[in-house]
Amino acid sequence: MRKVYLSLLIVSLFSGLLVSWQLRANLIAEAQAKQEPSLVDIIKSLEQEDAALEETIAKLRQDIDNLQKDSSQGQGRLAQLQKELETLRLYAGLVPVAGSGITVVVDDNNAGAQAAQKSSPATYRPEDYIIHDKNVLYLVNDLKNAGAEAIAINGLRLVTTSHIRCVGTVILVNSTRIAPPYEIQALGDPEALTAALQQSLEYAYLKSRDFPIKITTATEMVLPAYNGVFPSEHLRLLQAGGH
Amino acid sequence: MVKGKSWSISLTVVFLILGLLLALQFRTQQNLTSSLEAQKTTDLVAMWRNLDNKRNQLQEEINQLQQQYFTLKIDSGAGNEAEQTLEKELTRLRMSTGIAPVKGNGITVTITGDAPLMYMDLVDLLNELWASGAEAQAINDIRISAFSSIADLEEGNRIYITVDGHKLLYPVVIKAIGDPHTLEKGLTFTGGLIDNLNNLYNIYPVIRQEQDLELPAAPLPQWQHIKPQPSADKNNKTEQFPG
């Protein structure tokens, strides 16, 4: 029987515990009812808002990261393009160049003109004693044939579209007036250039007409850059394979 | 004995139910104490303050990130612009130096095989066309660059005119891109080049204005003797981008 009492005692104890807990729970529930519901709502909405803001930050950081990657790639591409442009500007003649080469100086045949004027003024033709645009043009072509890699006349660099012409008795190179003596500088192998020029038709012609013409070689000389423009109003790039 | 047994069964059942109830009550209790509603008002206010602070900080971070994002965005836009400018300049130089194929309006000058043509006549024609505003030229589909050489070559009993070492076969056709009218006028004015060719050499080139002429590319120049004129500025650059 004592065992039964013990059990009963335990049961009663637990029941008491249960009742007291329940009571507390009720009290808390009552307190909840009294609690400002708005405060809890505010906290809940703040929590939601903060979570959304955190998401926005994560997304922005990702976007910024992507942009930074793009920009560093763009800078790599820019550097590549700049290097290409540098090479092209060199080919185009837009950069001063240095190297070995020769200087050809040719002048009007003033002595011959004076002599002719004195000895036979009747048949004297002044144009026979001056250097014409053609003479310079053919000398330049001969230098190109001899393998000249860059050419300048009286400090004017020759490029693709350069032309040598005269207007009246004045020679224009790249539409700029130049005056005698004409100094043609050509970069390349000095010996080869000299040899080829001395065998060329134009050189022989000028020599035969007693024009003063002189070739000097140099191991290092500098040709200036072309300062003009390349006309490209009508030019369009022909895409490879485009017909 | 029977009485004792029924007691113990009842007790077991009671204990079981009690245990269950206790467990349930315990869980309810836990939920209650961890829920917001169970907190004291002062704690809730503290939490609210915390969350509010956090929200302000997050907001500030977002503002900063957004600013960074827009700055980057503008920079990358500028980068693109710089890239486009470079690309444009590159294309222009490729076309003008002759290393890219081009198309455009212009004229063709055709010389047939019965004409006593000499290579100097071609040098004159090219020069005259450049002077008249030609932007690109080719002879028999060999593109003319700043380094093109025009010469002649004796082979057996025939003399060929060569452009960059290529023998020209008749008819010789010069294609020049530029304003067709200006180009034609540049050759055909009285006392001009065509007049001279007609009267002095019995060469009668045929000039035609053309639309959409296509000119091939010239090879890259093979330079052996020249290099860019080094300047203090350039040295640094080549160190940065070797090769």
Image (tube, helix red, strand yellow):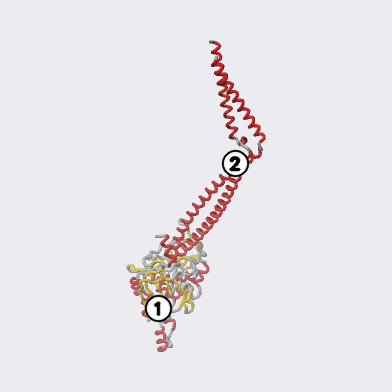
User: Which element type, helix, strand or loop, lies under badge 1?
Assistant: strand
Q: Could one spot residue B151 in this view of the protein?
A: no
- Residue A47: which numbered mark, if any? 2
Which residue is at a point 50% across and 72% down the rendered structure image?
Answer: B188
Quadrant showing the N terminus of chain A: top right
Provide residue A223's location: percent of width, then percent of height: 42, 71
In the figure, residue B110 lies in which quadrant?
bottom left
Alpha carbon distance from label 1 to label 2: 91 Å
Which residue is at a point 66% across and 34% down the rendered structure image?
Answer: A33
In the figure, residue A209 lies in which quadrant?
bottom left
Residue B25, above or below B61:
above
| Disc 1 versus disc 2: nearer the observer | 2
In the figure, residue A198 lies in which quadrant?
bottom left
Amino acid identity at mark 2: Glu
**Is the C-beta separation of discs 1 and 2 under 8 Å?**
no
- Which of pointers 1 and 2 lies earlier in the amino acid sequence? 2
Label 1: chain letter: A
Is label 1 on the same chain as label 2? yes
Nearer to us in this view, B164 or B193: B164
Relative to residue A35, is residue B72 drawn left or right?
left
Q: Residue furthest left?
A: B156
Nearer to us in this view, A206 or B239: B239
Provide residue A42's location: percent of width, then percent of height: 64, 41
